[in-house]
Amino acid sequence: MKRLLITGFDPFGSNDINPSWEAVKALPDLIDDYILHKLSIPTAFDRAARLIMECTEEFSPDTILSIGLAAGRNAVTPERIAVNIRDAAIPDNDGNQPVGERIIADGPAAYFSTIPVEAIAEAILAMGIPATVSNSAGTFVCNDVLYTLLHYYAKTRTRIGFIHVPYLPEQGEPSLPLRSTIDALIAAIKCL
């Protein structure tokens, strides 16, 4: 069996819930060849990625897949690229609001995800759930997590990916029902 560390974020900004964690915690513990270890992470620069890396010391995952909320998107979007920038429109949950800061001072401008983003989007679409590959993980904590993990694991066999999900219907539009988001994540994991 392979090991998957899958994370979702806590609520942030004006949101009372975060669909990323709601979907992750509802996933089964086994999907195909993967044993899942689910982890809720804070919407906080530095702290979120650090918590993931601490967890990997115990769990030793083959793949790390983080899930985050992208308000305003109407599809499930696996992220292709992480960029070396922190530029927050709102404060994170620790009150940090960096503007134009590099994540890793001497790091490259960007990294590509090491999961099959195109195959994931196609598998989700085949289920009738809206999905597309995204070329921008933004510049908030989601991108911070993806870039930091890709940098840290760049010379290892651990695969790293990130998927953004829309709001739940009770949060506003555009949205996806929780069941659809869960099914999309199961389809994504089957592609890993």
Image (cartoon, grey):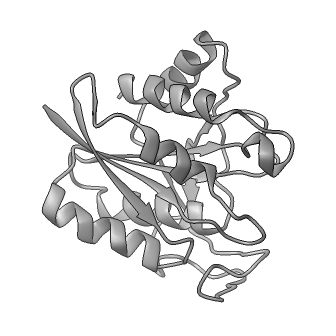
Q: Position of residue 53 (x, y in %)?
A: 29, 67
**Residue 15 appears left or right of 153:** right
Q: Position of residue 61 (x, y in %)?
A: 21, 49
In front: 36, or 118? Answer: 36
Give above or below for 67 relative to 95: above
Residue lying furthest right:
173
In front: 112, or 178? Answer: 178
- Residue at x-position 53% and y-position 32%: 182
* Callout count: 0
- Residue at x-position 39% and y-position 30%: 189
Q: Quadrant of the C terminus?
A: top left
Give above or below for 33 relative to 14: above
**Residue 124 appears left or right of 176:** left
Report whether residue 106 is seen: no
- Residue at x-position 34% and y-position 65%: 52
In front: 31, or 54? Answer: 31
Give above or below for 182 relative to 89: above
Q: Quadrant of residue 47?
A: bottom left
Q: Quadrant of the N terminus?
A: top left
Report whether residue 47 is seen: yes
Q: Quadrant of residue 175?
A: top right
Residue lying furthest bottom:
95
Q: Position of residue 48 (x, y in %)?
A: 45, 71
**Residue 175 appears left or right of 78:** right
Give above or below for 134 relative to 151: above
- Residue at x-position 53% and y-position 61%: 9
In front: 17, or 54? Answer: 17
Q: Quadrant of residue 180?
A: top right
Q: Position of residue 74 (x, y in %)?
A: 79, 35
